[in-house]
Image (cartoon, rainbow, N blue to C red):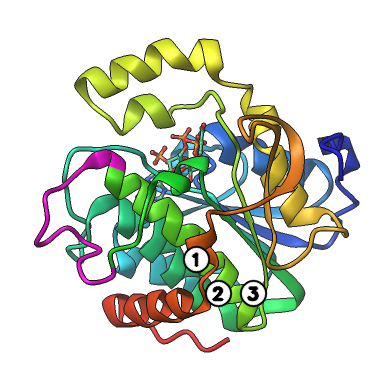
Amino acid sequence: MTGSWRAADIPDLSGRVAVVTGTSSGLGAVIAAELAGRGAHVIHGVRDPAAVPGVDARRLDLADLDVVAGFAGSVDGFDVLVNNAGVMWPPLRRTRQGFEWQFGVNHLGHFALTALLWPRRRPGARVVTMSSILHRTGRLDLADPNYLHRRYSPEGAYAQSKYANVVFGLELHRRGGMSVVAHPGYARSRLQTSGPTGVRAAVGRVMNPVFGQPASVGALPALFAATAPEAVSGSFVGPSFLQLWGGPVVVAPVSGARDAALGERLWAVSEELTGIPFAV
Ligand SMILES: NC(=O)c1ccc[n+]([C@@H]2O[C@H](COP(=O)([O-])OP(=O)(O)OC[C@H]3O[C@@H](n4cnc5c(N)ncnc54)[C@H](OP(=O)(O)O)[C@@H]3O)[C@@H](O)[C@H]2O)c1
């Protein structure tokens, strides 16, 4: 795997059903379009279905587990689930069930969605979970994942949520699911300007055009993970050059995220917080 894999290499997906979260912009929009372009029926999980006209778009708000349950209940079966939606660096706010927003949306919402969809998977179904190179700067504080007792940091909470994405994806693999984790490097999208406020958003506006690669390239690791026959369960796929830019290659997550005991603990905490048992 040399990083030369391109969207043109996506195999024929006729008859396959793909569920993709967060397709109203950025990487999710590209992922959904490429999967549909190869013949998949794509179910778009979006907060506002009117924002993505002309496709099978259904309401999914990962910040409200009741809405997640309603969305999952509308899906009869799936071959591919891409847990892509995400938010970065917002000021402290809480989801409907009281979770810190980034841990709640980026991790717990997707944990709940995957758990609820799991019984509806078709043979060979894969789950792709989108993390970030910034998971490397994070740690998982399972004693207080929702910042109830410690000082909130937008950067710390984002890194924690993306760390959780890696730990979850690897644990799903250990439990027997076909699960691949991906990250896009640095891609131009709304992420860096819609979540943060003030100086953080201003920095994003300046940095994106200079350092961001097109979303069409940033989407390739997730597309590889979702479709390539050679994608390996339990692997982490990211961009080839400095893990920031370029085509997909297998990369290494930060070593602590591979800890099986941590995976078990995150699983248990996620089941407890969401109230959703997830037996693989
Ligand atoms: N761009 C990068 O450089 C980069 C780097 C590392 C990782 N990532 C990851 O890549 C993924 C996609 O990000 P992006 O860059 O494409 O950003 P984006 O353009 O901001 O897209 C994020 C998507 O997530 C959706 N979303 C946000 N909150 C949601 C919620 N509560 N419920 C359901 N959907 C929600 C957004 O929908 P709305 O239209 O409803 O807001 C949007 O469709 C994220 O997981 C992000 O962490 C991106």
Badge 3 amino acid: His
Label at residue 173: 3
User: Residue placed at 56% from the left, 66% from the top?
Assistant: 169
- Find out whether the residues at labels 3 and 2 contact each other: C-beta distance under 8 Å: yes
Label at residue 8: none
Q: Secondary structure at mark 1?
A: helix
- Find out whether the residues at labels 1 and 2 contact each other: C-beta distance under 8 Å: yes
Quadrant location, the C terminus: bottom right
**Residue 123 in view of the camera:** yes
**What's the distance in space between the residues labelled 1 and 3, CA to CA?**
10 Å
**Mark 1: is the Cβ under 8 angstroms from ligand 1?**
no
**Mark 3: is the Cβ under 8 angstroms from ligand 1?**
no
Badge 1 amino acid: Val
Give above or below for 186 relative to 266.
above
Q: Secondary structure at mark 2?
A: helix
Range of magenta residues: 142-155
Question: 34 and 254: which one is in front?
Answer: 254
Q: Secondary structure at mark 3?
A: helix
For disc 1, the marked residue is 167
The picture places residue 109, in percent across and down from the top left corner, at 39, 63
Badge 2 amino acid: Glu
**Residue 60 in view of the camera:** no
Mark 3 packing: few (<14 Cα in 10 Å), some, or many (20+)?
A: many
* Quarter of the rendering containing residue 265: bottom left
Q: Is residue 207 magenta?
A: no
The picture places residue 131, in percent across and down from the top left corner, at 52, 50
Give above or below for 258 relative to 58.
below
For disc 2, the marked residue is 171
The picture places residue 55, in percent across and down from the top left corner, at 62, 44
* Quarter of the rendering containing residue 232: bottom right
